[in-house]
Amino acid sequence: MSAPSAVRLDGPGLPGRGNDVAENTARRDSDAPVIHARGLTKRYGTQTVVDQLDMTVHRGRVYGFLGRNGAGKSTTMKMLLDLARPSAGKVSVFGLGLPEHRSRVLPRVGSLIEAPSYYGHLTGEENLDIVRVLKRLPAAEIERVLTLVGLADHRRKRASAYSQGMKQRLGLAMALMGSPELLILDEPTNGLDPAGIQEIRELIVSLPARFGATVLVSSHLLSEIEQMADTVGIIDHGHLRYQGSPRSLEDHGRLRIAVDDSAAAAATLREAGWRVTAVADGEVTLPHLPDDRIARVVRLLVEAGAQLHRVEVRRRSLEEVFLRMTSETPREPLVAA
Ligand SMILES: Nc1ncnc2c1ncn2[C@@H]1O[C@H](COP(=O)(O)OP(=O)(O)OP(=O)(O)O)[C@@H](O)[C@H]1O
C-alpha cells in the first residue's frame, strides 16, 4: 500500500523549516497568483490530453475547474502537484517553479486526487494520525479535521468499513490537516449523498474566509461549480476554453421576432442598418438590444407592413453555454469489443 496521496514526505520543506528567500518573497506578495501555469501540456504516447493550458489561480479564491469526464482535469491537477511531469510548459505554485521547488511547495498544499488513499485496516483516526506525524502537527489537529468533515462519530471505525461518502470525507480530512494554504481537490463530492454534497460544498466555500486558503476544485457538474466557485476554468479535450468569473459566462440573450415574412422583415431591418444574426422560417433574430431600441425595431417592422406574432428575448442558460463550449465528439475512436 502506498502512502496517502494527500501527504508528501519532503522533509526539508516541512512547515517552519524552509527559510528560502524566494519562498518568503512569494509569501509576502499576496497579489501574486498562487498557481500560475503557462503552456502546460501532457502527452501520453501520441495522445495529447492537456494542450497548451494557461491557468491562473489567485489567492483566497475558489477556482472551479469544470469539464466533462476525460477532459483532462485530473491530469492537470497532477501536474500542479508534480505527480505527473508536463511534456511541455511551466508551472509555479506560490511563485516557486515546479519541479525544482517541490519540497518547498508541496508541504503547503493539501490534495485529494481521484480516489482517496488510506490504510483500510486502520481506523479513520489512525489514518489521520499517520498524516499528523508526517506533518508534525499537534494531536488536536485530528479532532479539528474530523469535526470539519463530519466524521467525528466514525473515528474508531476501520476505513475499509467506511461508506463511499465516508471515505471521501476521510480523504478531505487528510487534505485539510495542518490548514494548508492551497487545496487541490479533484471531484471532492464524489460518492456523497445530497446532504453530504451540500455540507462539503459549504465547507469548501468557507475555506478562504476561515483559513485564508485558496482552493482549486474540479467537477464535471456545472451546477456544483456555480455554487462553489468565484472563478471558473472550463476544460475541453485538454484545452482551456474559458477562464474568468461565472457571471461573465452568462448569456446576454438574443431578440427573436416571429413574423409572417421573415425574409422581407430581415431585408427591412438590414436596409435600416440593424444587424440581423439569423433568418429562419417565420423568425428573425437580432443581438440583444435595450428596451428603447426594441421598440424602434418593432415600429420599423409594423410601419413596413410586417405581421408580428411574437417578440421575445431569449437567454441561454449557463448549462447551455457550458454544453456549447464542450463538445461531445469522442477523442478516441470507439473500439468494438
Ligand atoms: N496514465 C495515463 N496514460 C494514458 N492516458 C491517460 C493517463 N491518465 C489519463 N489518461 C487519459 O487522459 C485523458 C484525460 O484524463 P483525466 O483523468 O485527466 O480526465 P478528467 O477530466 O479528470 O476526467 P474524469 O472527470 O473522468 O476524472 C483521458 O482520455 C484519459 O484516458
Image (spheres, rainbow, N blue to C red):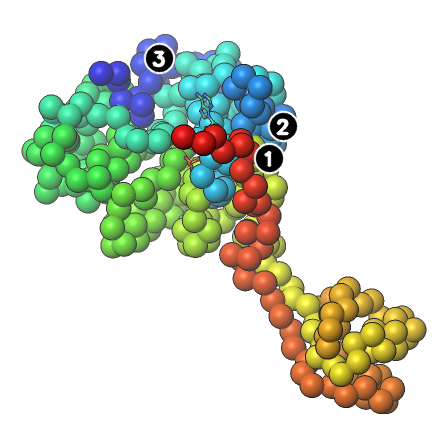
Image coords of residue 23 (percent x, y): 49, 19
What residue sits 77% from the left and 69% below the top? 279
What amino acid is found at the position of numbered circle 2 in the picture? Answer: Gln
* Distance between the alpha carbons at the discs numbered 1 and 3: 32 Å
Q: Residues within 10 Å of mark 3 (few under 14, many from 20)?
A: some
Contact? badges 2 and 3 (CB < 8 Å) = no
- The residue carrying mark 3 is 10
Query: What residue is rendered at 76% in x and 65% in y?
Result: 278
| Distance in Å between CA atoms under marks 2 and 3 | 29 Å
Residue 24, visible in the rendered structure: no
Instruction: Give above or below for 258 relative to 28.
Output: below
Label 2: how many Cα within 10 Å (few below 14, some 14–19, many 20+): some
Q: Amino acid at mark 3?
A: Asp
Q: Which residue is mark 1?
A: 239
Q: Residue furthest right?
A: 271
| Amino acid type, callout 1 | His
Asked if the residue under mark 3 is in contact with the one under mark 1, i.e. CB atoms within 8 Å, the reply is no
The residue closer to the viewer here, 150 or 66, is 66
Q: Which residue: 22% across, 39% down?
A: 164
Give the image location of residue 150, x and y in percent: 19, 44
Identify which residue is drawn at 25% across, 54% down: 195
**Decide: marks 2, 1 in contact (CB < 8 A)?**
yes
| Tag 2 residue | 52
